[in-house]
Amino acid sequence: DAGVIQSPRHEVTEMGQEVTLRCKPISGHNSLFWYRQTMMRGLELLIYFNNNVPIDDSGMPEDRFSAKMPNASFSTLKIQPSEPRDSAVYFCASRSTGQPIYEQYFGPGTRLTVT
Amino acid sequence: TQLLEQSPQFLSIQEGENLTVYCNSSSVFSSLQWYRQEPGEGPVLLVTVVTGGEVKKLKRLTFQFGDARKDSSLHITAAQPGDTGLYLCAGLDSGAGSYQLTFGKGTKLSVIP
């Protein structure tokens, strides 16, 4: 089975542009997480979905960030407008709440650079 | 907000040496996980510890959960270059049924051949 798929792997954009990151979770997983990783702050949870419904978006830094999960196999994280301080690696992870151990499976990440 | 402090932040050792890294919190977690992350990849789960005082072994890696479930350690025996990576601990918060993970900032390990 394929793991979590993220696209693009790298994104370089100019300040003010809209950025859309994409994620395909592992088939059958019903929870999806978006994280941001930086050297200064480590790995931070931005938002998570359960059965396609956003459960906790308290980690979303500000209104410029939005996330959607229109179906069980696809999610997007959008930044509009982007700023240089948004530069980071963004990870998507999924898990099945049916598992006894709440293991999250991470995608390879999208490295975002905003100039 | 539950915080996890990992130490040391950076560790560079020679192949064959032993090492221990630590993960500490003032909060109690229902369980704690250790992940390893290699450059350009996402974190990969190594182990989950659930019971206070629990010890788990994974080949040359030994994981221990503190009795009070607030801290954990990872000991590597005879480190190999393949052990190089970022080691992250993550506490599972089962409060309010959310089951969210809180990550430490990690220990970046370099094993020199």
Image (spheres, rainbow, N blue to C red):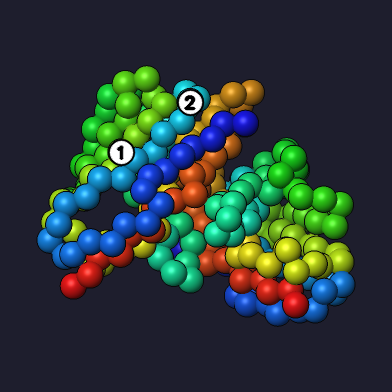
Q: Which residue is depicted at the point 74% across and 40% down?
A: A58
State the count of labels: 2
Q: Seen from this angle, which residue lies furthest top? A: B68
Amino acid bearing label 2 = Ser
The image shows residue A4 at horizontal and vertical percentages of 55, 62
Q: Is residue A24 visible?
A: no
Residue B104: assigned label: none
SS class of the residue under badge 1?
strand
The image shows residue B1 at horizontal and vertical percentages of 62, 31
Q: Which residue is depicted at the point 16% across and 65% down?
A: B15
The chain holding disc 1 is B
The image shows residue A3 at horizontal and vertical percentages of 50, 63
In this rendered view, identify the residue nearer to me: A102 or B6.
B6
The image shows residue B99 at horizontal and vertical percentages of 57, 33
Count neighbours of disc 1 (C-alpha within 10 A) and say few if under 14, some if 14 to 19, many if 20 or more. many
In this rendered view, identify the residue nearer to me: B40 or B21.
B21
Q: Name the residue under label 2.
A: B26
SS class of the residue under badge 2?
loop
The chain holding disc 2 is B
Side (left or right) of A115 relative to B99? right
Count neighbours of disc 2 (C-alpha within 10 A) and say few if under 14, some if 14 to 19, many if 20 or more. few
Side (left or right) of B102 relative to A24? left
Q: Which residue is depicted at the point 48% across and 25% down?
A: B26
Distance of mark 1 from mark 2, alpha carbons? 15 Å
Amino acid bearing label 1 = Ser
Q: Mark 1 points at which residue?
A: B73
- Image quarter (top left, top right, bottom left or bottom right) of the C terminus of chain B: bottom left
Of badges 1 and 2, the one in the foreground is 2
Q: Is B41 drawn above or below residue A42 in the view shown?
A: below
In terms of sequence position, does the residue under pointer 1 or pointer 2 come before the other? Answer: 2
